[in-house]
Amino acid sequence: MEGLSKNQVMRALRRLGELAQAREIEVEISIYGGCAMMLAFDRRAITRDIDAVFHPTSDVEGLITQVGTEMQLPEEWLNDDVRQFLAPVGAMRALPLDLPGLKITTPTASYLLAMKALAGRTALPGYDGDEADLRFLIRKMKIRTIDQVQKHIDQYYPDDLPSESARAMIIQIIREENSK
């Protein structure tokens, strides 16, 4: 799978921070998805992109483009497409990364579990889907039942349920993890 390694992500974020400092801007970035799994839990080696919400948006967009050009990164290497999937109130935590010019946060394990459970994407050629991340979170959080997963979902998305296929995948993961 093509994508960004942890090293590439860190270099790109470091450069973004340098550019922000040079312009005397403090950039706040909330990182989600596969990159959050990579940075917060050292869970992945590669991510397709960095799904994030960043502020101040108008000041940061040009810097993102500049970093992408300088480092020959994909056009959407850092994007805010995840914004449409965010809960009205999500639980975030600061990442202890030494990246001057940047304040970086990621969702808590509970919030990530809720997001991944609702997305419930299956693997496709070139894309791992959510199964491996769900498996990791279920193991880490010692989840034993689908009801426990639903309680995490209810904290952030009180009116949502996983799709039937996502629910089946989660139940299968829980069974496999509990049988170990």
Image (tube, grey):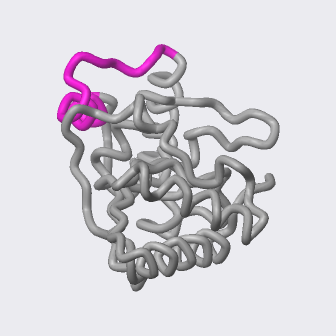
| Residue 148 painted magenta | yes
For the record, the magenta segment spans 147-164
Q: How many marks?
A: 0
Q: Residue at x 68, y 68 (%)?
A: 5
**45 displayed left or right of 92:** right
User: Which is the main secondary structure of the residues drawn in magenta?
Assistant: helix
In percent of width and height, residue 166 lies at 50, 24
Task: Name the foreground residue: 10 vs 129.
Answer: 10
Task: Name the foreground residue: 22 vs 126.
Answer: 22
**13 displayed left or right of 114:** right
Task: Name the foreground residue: 29 vs 170.
Answer: 29
In percent of width and height, residue 171 lies at 45, 30
Q: Is residue 32 above or below residue 4?
A: above
- Quadrant of residue 159 within the rendered picture: top left
The answer to whether any part of residue 34 appears in the image is no
In percent of width and height, residue 118 lies at 42, 28
Q: Is residue 40 above or below residue 139?
A: below
**70 displayed left or right of 111:** right
Q: Residue at x 40, y 85 (%)?
A: 98
Q: Residue at x 67, y 51 (%)?
A: 48
The answer to whether any part of residue 21 appears in the image is yes
Task: Name the foreground residue: 141 vs 61.
Answer: 61
| Residue 69 painted magenta | no
In percent of width and height, residue 37 lies at 48, 58
Find the residue positioned furthest to the front.
23
Q: Residue at x 44, y 73 (%)?
A: 20
